[in-house]
Each structure stands twice: as structure tokens, then as C-alpha cells.
Amino acid sequence: MYLQRSSFGVYYTRIPLPKFARDRGFLHALRVSLLTKSRKIAVQRNPLVSGCVLSFLQQPETFRSRENFDRDLRDLRRGLRGSGRFNPAFMGM
């Protein structure tokens, strides 16, 4: 998991996918917004969001098809965002 800052100043977590997934046509890495421009807040949110994404990637059905992967990833991102804000309830905080 990597912490990255976009050119607009928003922080993201980036998680590279395994080689077998890339060979099957999946993305090279996932980027999920941490919904903040503050590095201090981003450092706190990064392990929480990364943990959710890593648990998603470890599910056996994650890499079955690209369509299901994209749909489930979109749902995960929506759950993390909540209603346009960071949603700690989604992560069990």
C-alpha cells in the first residue's frame, strides 16, 4: 500500500494487484481516494482503507471476472465514501 498525492492535493491509497490478476487483464493497481488534502489525516486513514481493500482482494471470488470485480470495487468505494464523506462506520470504527 502506498500513499500518493494527486496534482490537486488529494491523497489516495494505491495498492498494486498481483501478477496473475494483471496477466488476466485486470488493473495494475487500485487507487482509492482518502477524501482529504491533509497529510496528517491521510496517514491515519491509509491503513484503514488499505485494510478494507486488502480484505476485498483476498476474497476468492474477487478475480473471477472483470465485470464482477469492477462492480464490487465500485460498491466498496461507495461504502468507504458514505454520503460524500469518509465513512468510519463502514470500516467498523
Image (cartoon, rainbow, N blue to C red):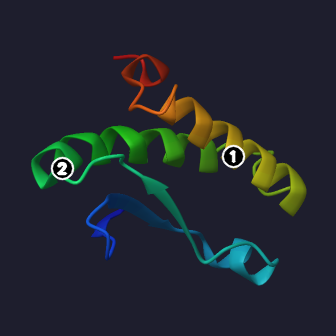
Seen at 10% across and 48% down, the residue is 40
Residue on which disc 1 sits: 74
Q: Residue 59 — which label?
A: none
> Where the N terminus falls, by quadrant?
bottom left
Seen at 52% across and 46% down, the residue is 53
Seen at 36% across and 48% down, the residue is 34
Q: Position of residue 66 (x, y in %)?
A: 85, 62
For the residue pair 9 and 93, the one nearer the viewer reads as 9
State the image quarter where residue 67 is shown. Answer: bottom right
Please name the amino acid that badge 2 sits on. Answer: Val
- Kindly state the secondary structure of the residue where label 1 is placed: helix
Q: Reading the chain from its start, which is encountered first: label 1 or label 2?
A: 2
Q: Is residue 51 visible?
A: yes
- Kindly state the secondary structure of the residue where label 2 is placed: helix
> Where the C terminus falls, by quadrant?
top left
Q: Position of residue 52 (x, y in %)?
A: 48, 38
**Residue that extends furthest to the left in the rendered view of this protein:** 40
Residue on which disc 2 sits: 43
Seen at 51% across and 48% down, the residue is 54
Q: Is residue 66 above or below residue 28?
A: above
Q: Is residue 68 found left or right of 44 in the rendered image?
A: right
For the residue pair 35 and 68, the one nearer the viewer reads as 35
Q: Is residue 63 above or below residue 55?
A: below
